[in-house]
Amino acid sequence: MTPYGQVYNPTQSPEWRQAGGNPIIYNQIIEQKLMAAQQKAMASQLKAAEAEYKALQKKQQAHERWLKEQKAKKEKNQPVDPAYQRLLDLEAQQKAAMEARISRAAAKRTKKRPTSKPAVPPVTEAKKDGDEGK
């Protein structure tokens, strides 16, 4: 034991004995173990990601069912969830804002631009050298 922890001697490991004392084979065995550990970690991450994806799908399906139920209640003139009403109000506001933007853009396009004088003076024929004083 040292002040920095236990000393690890690779020549006393089961991998070293498996390699028969050959350092090249020992390195290959260690690399294989590392690759197996990485693959196991990747598989667990993939499994966790799939579980998260399934949970999100369930949540989305539940939300869609809720929307369908609230829409059916609204069509039957039954009271709806306040959150659904806020959602409808927000959609109506967004639609009105979009229509206002479209109408403003259309008004700008149809608005006539004032005509300005041309920046370049009209081209005139230059006098010939012999016609100046006559």
Image: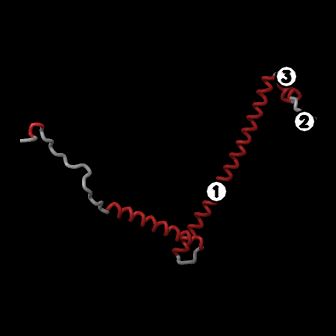
- The foreground one among 72 and 46 is 46
**Which quarter of the figure has residue 3?**
top right
Total tally of numbered discs in the picture: 3
Residue with the mark numbered 1:
56
Amino acid at the residue labelled 1:
Leu
Residue at the limit of the structure toward the right, as seen here: 1
Residue with the mark numbered 2:
6
Residue at 12%, 38% in the rendered image: 128
* Circle 1: element type: helix
Q: Could you give the CA–CA distance between mark 3 and mark 2, rounded to whole angstroms?
A: 22 Å
Amino acid at the residue labelled 2:
Gln
- Residue 118, given in percent of the width and then of the height, sits at 25, 52
Residue with the mark numbered 3:
21
Mark before the other along the chain sequence, 2 or 1: 2
**Which quarter of the figure has residue 23?**
top right
* Circle 2: element type: loop
- Residue 64, given in percent of the width and then of the height, sits at 58, 63
Quarter of the image where the C terminus is located: top left
